[in-house]
Amino acid sequence: MLLKKFDENKEALKQIGREAIAESRRLGLPISARDRQNEAVNGGVKAGHVAEQKSATMAPA
């Protein structure tokens, strides 16, 4: 029972991560190399790891 709940939560967090990456792309925000690598390997991203923004990568308005 506990393992089943763990797996459900893990999948839900992966989905949240995929949605966050999709939203970051839609907004034109940078996607971290770690997130891109996780997408390529796992078909998704690690839960809780959001796109990293660095001021050096942001173009001045």
Image: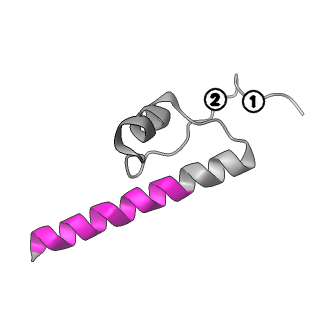
- Counting from the top left corner in percent of width and height, residue 57 is at 70, 25
Q: Which amino acid lies under the numbered mark 2 shown in the image of this protein? A: Lys
Using the numbered discs, state the Cα–Cα distance from disc 1 to disc 2 in whole angstroms. Answer: 7 Å
Compared to 10, does 37 lie above or below? above
Residue at the top extreme of this rendering: 56
> What residue is shown with label 2?
54
Q: Residue at x 32, y 63 (%)?
A: 11
- Image location of residue 25, percent across then percent down: 66, 46
**Residue at position x 11%, y 68% from top?**
3
As drawn, the label of residue 58 is 1
In magenta, the rendered stretch is 2-19
In this picture, residue 29 sits left or right of residue 12: right
Q: Quadrant of the N terminus?
A: bottom left
Q: Is residue 6 magenta?
A: yes
Q: Main secondary structure of the magenta part?
A: helix
Query: 15 or 41, which lies in front?
Result: 41
The verdict on residue 15 being magenta is yes
In the rendered image of this protein, does residue 14 appear above or below residue 30? below
Identified at 38% across, 61% down, the residue is 13
Q: Residues within 10 Å of mark 1 (few under 14, many from 20)?
A: few
The percent coordinates of residue 58 (x first, y second) are: 75, 30
Residue 3 circle label: none
Q: Quadrant of residue 49?
A: top left
